Image (cartoon, grey):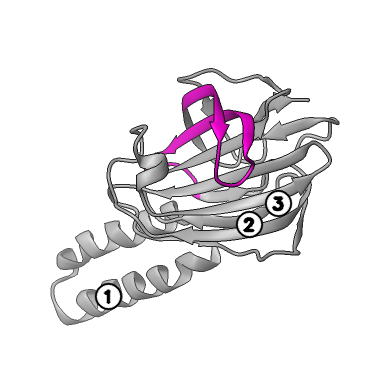
């Protein structure tokens, strides 16, 4: 059975009702477009199960999509140290449920208002509306930032400070195309490259 993310049920219900009403009131063919929209909503908000790797000292991708950036940088706001940054662009056709990259305790969750430029640009990481989740882990602090995109206008983070997460555990989602930035301790070995496709909770993106 197709699992749907909780945030998707209002959209599923509305498009289903509209499709049925149009089918019953007008000619059946007039319900084709609403039906297509309903099927797209089901597809978009799908939340498949994933097989989480069990190896030690690894970090998994927090999002489905394509790696658009891998670099060494200085994260000045939360970690305040040199880090490895991995950025993943999520198209409307990717699964949009986000997962924890490793075990950890949530130290901070911060929503920052901003713009809605294309999520694949470098500027989007800091200028777009985003939600940052800071984790305390055995490897040091790890930051995951959900970044809204040109179409995406709403990110959802389901956790609060003090919550504990397991590697691969669902913790939120971004509606429609968007971006997720992952900041890991500088000493990790990054295992993915720009252009590589990754799957949330399954693809190993770095190793300690």
Judging depth in this view, the residue of 117 and 30 nearest the camera is 117
Residue 1 visible within the image: no
Q: Give the range drawn in magenta.
A: 68-96
Residue pictured at 21% horizontal, 60% vertical? 33
Does the rendering let one see residue 125?
yes
Circle 2 residue: 171
Name the residue tied to disc 1: 18
Residue 97, given in percent of the width and then of the height, sits at: 54, 51
Q: In this view, does 27 lie to the left or right of 45?
A: left
Q: What element carries label 3?
A: loop
What separation in Å lies between label 3 and label 1 (alpha carbons)? 34 Å
Which residue is depicted at the point 21% across and 67% down?
Answer: 31
CA separation, marks 1 and 2? 30 Å
Query: Residues at badges 3 and 2 in contact (C-beta under 8 Å)?
Result: yes
Disc 1 + disc 2, Cβ < 8 Å: no
Instruction: Name the residue located 34 percent from the left edge and 36 percent from the top edge.
Output: 123
- Nearer to us of marks 1 and 2 is 2
Asked which secondary structure carries label 2, the reply is strand
């Amino acid at each position: 059975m197709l699992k749907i993310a909780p945030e998707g049920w209002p959209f599923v219900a509305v498009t289903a009702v509209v499709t049925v009403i149009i089918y019953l009131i007008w000619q059946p063919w007039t319900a084709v477009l609403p039906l297509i929209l309903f099927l797209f909503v089901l597809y978009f908000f799908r939340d498949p199960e994933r097989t989480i790797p069990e190896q030690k000292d690894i970090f998994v991708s927090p999002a489905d999509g394509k790696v658009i950036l891998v670099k060494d940088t200085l994260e000045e706001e939360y970690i305040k140290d040199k880090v490895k940054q991995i950025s993943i662009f999520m198209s409307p056709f990717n699964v949009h449920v986000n997962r924890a990259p490793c075990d950890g305790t949530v130290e901070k969750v911060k929503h920052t208002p901003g713009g809605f430029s294309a999520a694949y640009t470098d500027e989007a990481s800091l200028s777009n509306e985003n939600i940052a989740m800071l984790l305390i882990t055995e490897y040091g602090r790890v930051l995951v930032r959900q970044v809204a995109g040109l179409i995406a206008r709403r990110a959802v983070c389901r956790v609060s400070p003090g919550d504990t997460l397991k590697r691969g555990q669902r913790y939120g989602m971004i509606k429609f195309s968007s971006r997720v930035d992952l900041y890991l301790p500088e000493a990790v070995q990054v295992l993915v490259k720009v252009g590589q496709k990754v799957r949330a909770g399954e693809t190993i993106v770095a190793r300690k």
